[in-house]
Amino acid sequence: MAKTSNLKPARQKSSGIGRIVGLAVLIVVIGIAFWARNHFMSNAESFAAYMDGMKSMQAGREQEAVTTWENLVVQDPSFPDAYVALATYYTNQGEAQHSIDLLEKAQANHLDTPELKLVRAEAYVRVNDKRGMAEAKEAVKVQPNEYRSHLALATAYAQAFDEPHAIEELHRAQQLAPNNPVLFLLGAEYTATVNDYAQVEAQARKAIQIAPGLAEGWYYVGWAIASGPSADRLPEARTDLEKSTQINPNSFSTWLELGDVCWKLHDVSSAQTSLEKARDLGAMPPAGGRETQQHLQDRIKTDHVLLEIYHSRGETARENLIRSESNRLSTRVQALLHAAGTQR
């Protein structure tokens, strides 16, 4: 069973290149404070307001920071760092189109700094805008030593299904920020989409070496081992997946994978427990609130293994209930496929 972006997992593979896009703008807004170059000399009042917003953000008062920067954009539309801070924040909140609208105002005011190029690229790739590739290449050109530039370009290549260049740019980002576990998690997620199990495991292990408490890292190690050719390593996969559930007990994908591994190990009781937890979690709306084909198919996979378990135990009532629900899910998958075909 595959598992999350936009570079998202195999079950986390479930959304294909989802995770790299979804996390391509995994940015810490407070880092922007270090971009302030010579604005203090050019406009001390605007710079002071900008820094007030940074202090609010660092203190966890996000809305106060956003209001400060929004007021600054109105009061001094020629001050670029306010646009950068706001665009970074909005893209990070999943409001990339808001960022794009804001950055278009900056362009209208003839503002075009290296930081603006970068956040523009990040916003475009977040929404899979065709301008993302050119903007990301420009961001790399003007900021070749900034890992986020390479991550944005990796995302653009992934969206274009250019695997070699996507991997190349992601590795450059990792080289520039070798202590950032998220970059290695993205590496695991992306290589999961192309079923390179050895690389998934290698990338995930680097992520958990840096951040042992990263549940998705443990998930990917377990998923890669379980998906590989050697059944002898299934107990190891089980241990890694159990570690992931201990850190995050609310991951549908992890419980699904753990249940599958336990079933392969002939531990029927543990398989049932894990799959029933997965089924309960899978019944909840997925992230973003929209039901996807992959999410429905994962729920069907969960039900199919449970059907085998209930059938082997003679639990006819449960078996009939699950079968009926699985049939309804299959109908919904067909409806989504039909809708997708109609839109083409």
Image: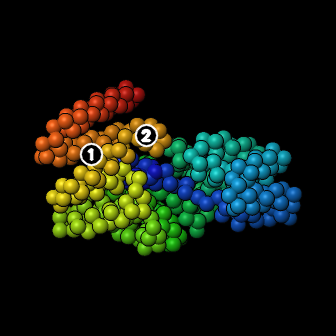
Residue 49 is situated, as x and y percent measured from the top left of the image, at 82, 56
Residue 262 is situated, as x and y percent measured from the top left of the image, at 22, 58
State whether residue 193 appears in this view.
no
Judge the density around disc 1: few (<14), some (14-19), many (≥20) Cα neighbours within 10 Å.
many
Foreground: 271 or 105? 271
Judge the density around disc 2: few (<14), some (14-19), many (≥20) Cα neighbours within 10 Å.
few
Asked where in the image residue 343 lies, by quadrant, the reply is top left
Amino acid bearing label 2: Pro
State left or right for residue 219 relative to residue 28.
left
State whether residue 240 appears in this view.
yes
Kindly give the residue lying farthest to the top in the view shown.
342
Asked where in the image residue 60 lies, by quadrant, the reply is bottom right
How far apart marks 2 and 1 lie (CA) works out to 16 Å
> N-terminal of the two: label 2 or label 1?
2
| Helix, strand or loop at mark 2 | loop
Label ID, residue 302: 1
Instruction: Determine the residue positioned at 43% across, 40% down.
Output: 285
Instruction: Determine the residue positioned at 46% across, 44% down.
Output: 287
| Helix, strand or loop at mark 1 | helix
Location of the C terminus (image quadrant): top left
Give the residue at mark 2. 285
State left or right for residue 124 relative to residue 338.
right
Residue 231 is situated, as x and y percent measured from the top left of the image, at 17, 64
Residue 252 is situated, as x and y percent measured from the top left of the image, at 36, 50
Foreground: 33 or 303? 303
Query: How many numbered badges does the structure rendering display?
Result: 2
